[in-house]
Image (tube, helix red, strand yellow):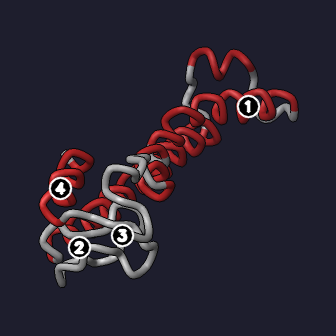
Amino acid sequence: MDGPSVSSVKWKMPRRHFQSCVLPVVPAVFLPMIYAFVYVKLIDFGIITAKQIAGFSGSPVMYAAVLGGIVITLVWIAAYAVRSMRYIKRFRECGGKLCFVCDYDLSDGQRRCPECGALWEPEKLGKNWRKFLD
């Protein structure tokens, strides 16, 4: 028997799935640092004072920075949600039979993925995807 068997395939999360899980977190993690950097630079250039930052005095620059960050975060989350919904729709359309390694559609009952060569048992394939998506 040539190619990997079901038991020899390592169940690592493919890179694209890892990115889709991590990317929405990036703005939430880095936005406070970006705000702090922007505020320090605005103080350095004399556009605002430290007193304005501490009191949030209503400076248009501060409102623009905060609202800009909120908009960027919401757009990022919306893009992630749309991407996730498309992926789940594609998964449901093919009956849960996507190759776990390369996302090739295996709905025609193939045991070996023509794209990457991985060998799959159709019964176990859907269960593995459901574990990942749930």
Q: 10 Å neighbourhood of mark 3: few (<14), some, or many (≥20)?
A: some
Residue 90: mark? 2
Work out how far the residue at label 1 is from the one at label 3, CA to CA, in angstroms: 40 Å
Give coordinates of residue 42: x percent, y percent.
Answer: 78, 34
Q: 10 Å neighbourhood of mark 1: few (<14), some, or many (≥20)?
A: few
Residue 103: mark? 3
Residue at the spot x=20%, y=63% of the render?
121
Q: Earlier in the sequence, mark 1 or mark 2?
A: 1
Dot 2 falls on a residue whose secondary structure is helix
- Nearest to the observer: residue 45 or residue 102: 102
Residue at the spot x=41%, y=54% of the render?
17
Q: Are dots 3 and 4 in contact, CB under 8 Å?
A: no
Work out how far the residue at label 4 is from the one at label 1, CA to CA, in angstroms: 49 Å
- 2 or 4: mark nearer the eye: 4
Q: Earlier in the sequence, mark 1 or mark 3?
A: 1
- Left or right for 96, reference 63: left
- 4 or 1: mark nearer the eye: 4
- 3 or 2: mark nearer the eye: 3
From the image, which quarter does the C terminus lie in?
top left
Residue 37: mark? 1
From the image, which quarter does the N terminus lie in?
bottom left
- 3 or 4: mark nearer the eye: 4
Work out how far the residue at label 2 is from the one at label 4, CA to CA, in angstroms: 18 Å
The amino acid beneath tag 4 is Lys
Dot 3 falls on a residue whose secondary structure is loop
Residue 124: mark? 4
The amino acid beneath tag 2 is Arg
Dot 1 falls on a residue whose secondary structure is helix
